Image: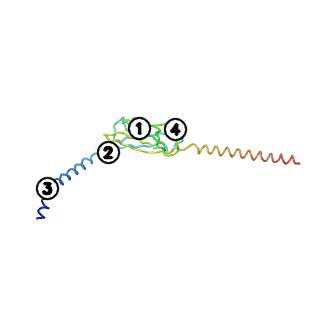
């Protein structure tokens, strides 16, 4: 009797299990074409250098792959503290290439500068990020400071030697 109850309960559930498996299969099949479509859609993003001093021009360039000619690309730039430096929309050429130049702000803190480019391609938002480093102007200023101190020390020594000679003559 217990085997009849067990087999009867499985028979009642079998259509529900088969339906759930069929729905799961359909969901998987529907997701495959969209992930394959996204593989052909991307953005490359580069800069002309890896580090920039305040006031120096930063050149950003890239390519939208899988987009339309004249594709719009949103570019967002944030400093190392997460503060927005610049946000612009540029238009890619017929080959998907785009470029943006801006000057590194004189007040930008040293550290990593985040650059993000986004474009809507075939209904999907595709994003690519890279970074550059903002370096302070101190390294070249430090050289000037060291040279200035060296000149002052040399002048002091030469004057100190003369005043010692003058003192020696006064004693004679």
Viewer-proximal residue, 90 or 24? 24
- Label 2 or label 3, whichever comes before in sequence order: 3
Question: Label 3, on which residue?
Answer: 12
Disc 4 and disc 1: Cα gap in Å? 22 Å
- Label 4 or label 3, whichever comes before in sequence order: 3
Question: Label 4, on which residue?
Answer: 105
Viewer-proximal residue, 71 or 20? 20
- Label 2 or label 1, whichever comes before in sequence order: 2
- Secondary structure state at the residue bearing disc 2: helix
Disc 3 and disc 1: Cα gap in Å? 61 Å
Disc 4 and disc 3: Cα gap in Å? 71 Å
Image quarter of residue 147: top right
Single out the mark in the foreground, 3 or 1.
Answer: 3
Single out the mark in the foreground, 2 or 1.
Answer: 2
Query: Mark 4–mark 1 contact, CB under 8 Å?
Result: no
Question: Label 1, on which residue?
Answer: 98
- Secondary structure state at the residue bearing disc 1: strand
- Secondary structure state at the residue bearing disc 4: loop
- Label 3 or label 1, whichever comes before in sequence order: 3
Local crowd size for mark 2, using a 10 Å CA cut-off: few (<14), some (14–19), many (≥20): some
- Label 4 or label 2, whichever comes before in sequence order: 2
Q: Which mark is residue 38?
A: 2
Local crowd size for mark 3, using a 10 Å CA cut-off: few (<14), some (14–19), many (≥20): few
Residue 164 rendering spot, x and y as whole percentages: 81, 48
Local crowd size for mark 1, using a 10 Å CA cut-off: few (<14), some (14–19), many (≥20): many
- Secondary structure state at the residue bearing disc 3: helix
Residue 36 rendering spot, x and y as whole percentages: 29, 47
Is 51 left, or right, of 164 in this rendering?
A: left
Single out the mark in the foreground, 4 or 2.
Answer: 4
When the figure is inspected, residue 89 is found, relative to residue 132, above or below; the finding is above
């Amino acid at each position: 009797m217990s085997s009849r109850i067990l087999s009867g309960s499985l028979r009642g559930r079998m259509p529900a299990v088969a339906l759930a498996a069929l729905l799961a299969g359909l969901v998987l099949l529907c997701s495959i074409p969209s992930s394959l479509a996204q593989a052909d859609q991307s953005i490359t993003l580069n800069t002309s250098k890896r580090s920039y001093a305040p006031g120096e021009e930063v050149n950003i360039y890239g390519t939208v792959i899988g987009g339309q000619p004249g594709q719009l690309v949103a570019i967002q730039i944030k400093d190392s503290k997460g503060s927005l430096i610049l946000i612009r929309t540029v238009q890619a050429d017929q080959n998907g290439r785009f470029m943006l130049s801006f000057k590194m702000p004189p007040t930008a803190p040293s550290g990593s500068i985040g650059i993000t480019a986004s474009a809507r391609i075939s209904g999907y938002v595709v994003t690519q990020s890279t970074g550059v480093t903002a370096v302070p102007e101190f390294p070249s200023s430090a050289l000037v400071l060291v040279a200035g101190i060296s000149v002052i020390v040399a002048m002091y020594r030469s004057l100190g030697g003369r005043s010692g000679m003058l003192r020696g003559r006064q004693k004679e």
